[in-house]
Amino acid sequence: MSDLLLDINLQQLPDDYFKGEWHVANRVLNRNDPGSPMAQATRFVLKADQLEAQAPAAGLSQTGNWAVMRDEILNRPYLSFELPTEATRALVTRLRRSADGLNSQLNLYFSSGMEMQLDRA
């Protein structure tokens, strides 16, 4: 991604910024099960309330739901993911976007300890 990306204030972030097609750029599993759908996915499609997690190499694709939640004190965004075989949530630790909004980078920290960087272009 060659465009200059700007940090977005997470407390004032519109939920629509999460929608779209995201590709996994980097992942650190930590304690997460390496065989879980979220750990194997290479692409996520977030639209309306629907989530599609795709892992072409493993022949795995699951459809479920996702939602944005915010903590009451700091208004930090969390993403809640529900797939048929896995339910988890992740704290949004960083979101960066290009000035035109066409390129984005999303960093997530999952309750399992997994860390993931997603790119959208």
Image (tube, rainbow, N blue to C red):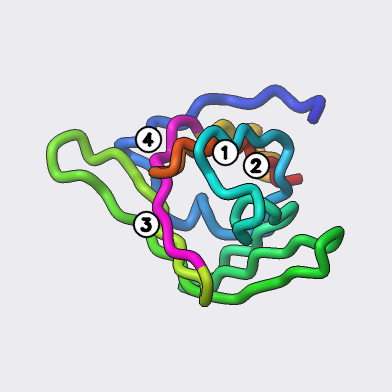
Residue at 63% over, 50% down: 39
On whether residue 75 falls in the magenta region, the answer is: no
Badge 3 element:
strand
Name the amino acid type tagged 3: Val
Residue at 39% over, 63% down: 67
Question: Around disc 1, counting alpha carbons within 10 Å, would you say few (fewer than 14), some (14 to 19), or many (20 or more)?
Answer: many
Q: Residue 99 location, x and y as percent?
A: 63, 33
Which comes sooner in the sequence, label 3 or label 2?
3
Which comes sooner in the sequence, label 4 or label 2?
4
Please name the residue that numbered disc 4 is placed on: 10
Name the amino acid type tagged 2: Leu
Badge 1 element:
strand
Residue 120 appears left or right of 76: right
Q: Which mark is residue 106?
A: 1
Which comes sooner in the sequence, label 3 or label 4?
4
Does the CB distance between marks 3 and 1 fall below 8 Å? no
Does the CB distance between marks 2 and 1 fall below 8 Å? yes
Q: CA distance from mark 3 to mark 1?
A: 14 Å
Does the CB distance between marks 4 and 2 fall below 8 Å? no
Q: What stretch of residues is rendered in magenta?
A: 86-94
Does the CB distance between marks 3 and 2 fall below 8 Å? no
